[in-house]
Image (cartoon, rainbow, N blue to C red):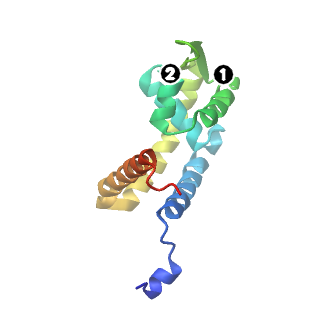
Amino acid sequence: MPTDSDRHRILCAGTNLKIAARATGRLYDRAFAPFDLNTMQYAILANIARAGSIPTMALSDKLSIERTALYRALAVLERRGLIRTEAGRGREQILSLTDTGDALRLRAKAAWALTQEAFVEAFGEDWPKFLGMLERARAISERLSEQGECAP
């Protein structure tokens, strides 16, 4: 039986996750605005830097972003001279940062660190549990999607 608080609460996991993701994305987007980056662009730069170079498919999988959306983001970063692409096997492209891209990433990383620290600190001792729950939600969603259990 729903309680009074349940009547005013959104109970859908998908809706709640989207709302939280949009709010969190806006927080990080504000931090990256002085660098003319958004959260996804920074994530792309950071993950390319971490790998040194990475195939587009591997980056798409790592960030769980559809390839077409990734290609659009990569085109912007490449036009700005922040990344370079080289031919890989078949149609695959290998991504790496330019010196300009790495310098911008390093400057933006300071803004990321301040935002990340404030966000994690707000969770306090619940941060590891929250992070684990997010990882679990992703894994459950991927498993259910692969099994087709939620499709009409």
Name of the residue lying farthest toward the right? 79
Q: CA gap, disc 1 to disc 2? A: 18 Å
Name of the residue lying farthest toward the bottom? 4
- The image shows residue 117 at horizontal and vertical percentages of 41, 50
Q: Which residue is mark 2?
A: 55
- The image shows residue 116 at horizontal and vertical percentages of 44, 49
The residue depicted at 66 percent of the width and 38 percent of the height is 36
Q: Nearer the viewer, mark 1 or mark 2?
A: 2
The residue depicted at 46 percent of the width and 83 percent of the height is 5
Name of the residue lying farthest toward the front? 152
The residue depicted at 50 percent of the width and 83 percent of the height is 7
The residue depicted at 42 percent of the width and 46 percent of the height is 142
- What amino acid is labelled 1 in the image? Gly
Please say if 16 is above or below 134. below
Please say if 10 is above or below 89. below
Q: Which residue is mark 1?
A: 81
- What amino acid is labelled 2 in the image? Pro
